[in-house]
Image (cartoon, rainbow, N blue to C red):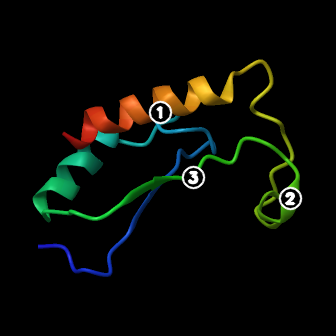
Amino acid sequence: MAVSWLRCRLGENNRMPPGYGYIPWIEIGSALRHINYQGYVVMEPFMMPGGQVASDIKVFLNLSVGLDLDEEARKALLFTRGFLK
C-alpha cells in the first residue's frame, strides 16, 4: 500500500501534457495500481516561456503555438484517466 504522504506528478519528457512524449504511461498506471495508490495525481506540462517557474526550468520554446490549451488539458485528462483505470 502506498504511504499517505506519497504524491504523483505527471509530465512528459518533452514538457508537454501526458500522451505527447515517450513515457510508458500504461506501465506507470499499472505500478500505481500495484501499490494501491489512492492520492492525487497532478499534471505539470510546461509549454510556455515566461514567469518564474518557466525561467527556473529553462523553458525557452513556446510549445503551445496553435493549440487550444483548454482542449489540450481536456485531452490530457482523458488520456490520464485511461491509463489510471
Residue 21 picture location, percent across and down: 52, 35
First along the sequence among labels 1 and 2: 2
Residue sitting at 80 percent across and 24 percent down? Answer: 65
Can you tell which quarter of the image residue 68 is in? Answer: top right
Please rate how many residues cluster around mark 2, counting C-alpha atoms within 10 Å: few if below 14, some from 14 to 19, many from 20: few
Q: Is residue 7 above or below residue 22?
A: below
Q: Which mark is residue 38?
A: none
Which residue carries the number 2 mark? 51
Would you say 12 lies left or right of 36 here?
A: right
What quarter of the picture does the C terminus occupy? top left
Residue sitting at 86 percent across and 58 percent down? Answer: 51
Residue 22 picture location, percent across and down: 47, 37
Can you tell which quarter of the image residue 15 is in? Answer: top right
Q: Is residue 20 visible?
A: no
Which residue carries the number 3 mark? 44
Element at badge 2? helix
First along the sequence among labels 3 and 2: 3
Please rate how many residues cluster around mark 1, counting C-alpha atoms within 10 Å: few if below 14, some from 14 to 19, many from 20: some
Which residue carries the number 1 mark? 76
